[in-house]
Image: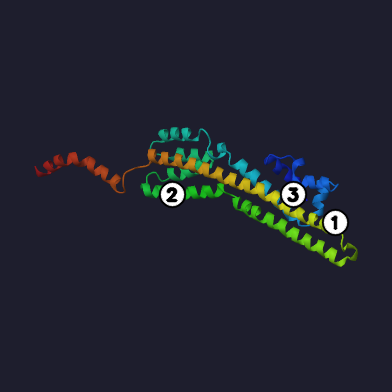
Amino acid sequence: MVNLLLAVPWFSVLGQTAAESPLAQAGTASGGSVFELVVKGGWMMIPIGICSLVALGVIAERLASLRRARVIPPAFMRGLKAVMVVDGEDRSKALEYCQNADSPVSQILAAGIKRLHEPIDLLEKHIEDAGQRVVFRLRKHLRLLSVIGSIAPLLGLLGTMFGMIKAFQTVAVSGEALGKTELLAKGIYEALITTAAGLLVAIPVWIGYHWISGRVEHLVSEMDEMTVEFVEQYADPRPPGEAAAVPRLAETPDEPASTAAAAS
């Protein structure tokens, strides 16, 4: 029963008003309100209504969580680069800065800052692992939206089947109903209410699902570009072992003098 109340905002999203919705028109045509029409849909309207409530909550939560200012704070990279310059070889302040930012992009870059001294392939592996964890959190509850979008029409169809069975059963057992097609038509139209309700839930849910998925992909692509730029700027490009060889190379100019002293 709650479903039809939630269907009104969904139709607003699709550019229709509540008065233009098929269920509202059907309720007006039958001489009753939309609420009465929902009641005629039977008990199957209850799970459909629950699905609409859950979907509405998930979409609202994802819209709030996927704001760009929350995922990628506007001044984060500028502040991080300033801290990196102050830190020098010590990255403790940069790590603290990322922890205080507490955003998806800061979590990815914090994983890279901890291992800037490691070989580039190992550094990229740690950043990739951190990125996968962040993407998993960004896509939170999307599978639930997918499930709701798939089962809502099925619940509506199931309710219609139950309504059709009831309508034909009423006609079959009632001798007075023989030849009165209006009784059968009434039962069929009431049975079709659940199918319409299921579609009213499923269509906006799928729209929300694909919009949120596209939003996540856009944010992930932007974070990927920022991470690549950060690694290219601050990662140690030298292969493993070369860093240890540098001090020995620096001592080579003194070796002839020390060797000469030993010979003398």
**Amino acid type indicated by mark 1:** Glu
Give the mark nearer the N terminus: 3 vs 2.
Answer: 3
Residue 152: percent from the left, percent from the top?
69, 54
Give the mark nearer the N terminus: 2 vs 1.
Answer: 2
Q: Nearer the viewer, mark 1 or mark 3?
A: 1
Judge the density around disc 3: few (<14), some (14-19), many (≥20) Cα neighbours within 10 Å: many
107 relative to 35 in the view: left or right: left
Q: Secondary structure at mark 2?
A: helix
Q: Secondary structure at mark 1?
A: helix
Residue 165: percent from the left, percent from the top?
78, 63
**Amino acid type indicated by mark 3:** Asn
Which residue occupies the foreground of this view, 182 or 173?
182
Q: Is residue 44 above or below residue 28?
A: below
Residue 128: percent from the left, percent from the top?
45, 49
Q: Which mark is residue 3?
A: 3
Residue annotated with mark 1: 182
Q: Are marks 3 and 2 in contact (CB under 8 Å)?
A: no
80 relative to 18 in the view: left or right: left
Which residue occupies the foreground of this view, 180 or 111?
180
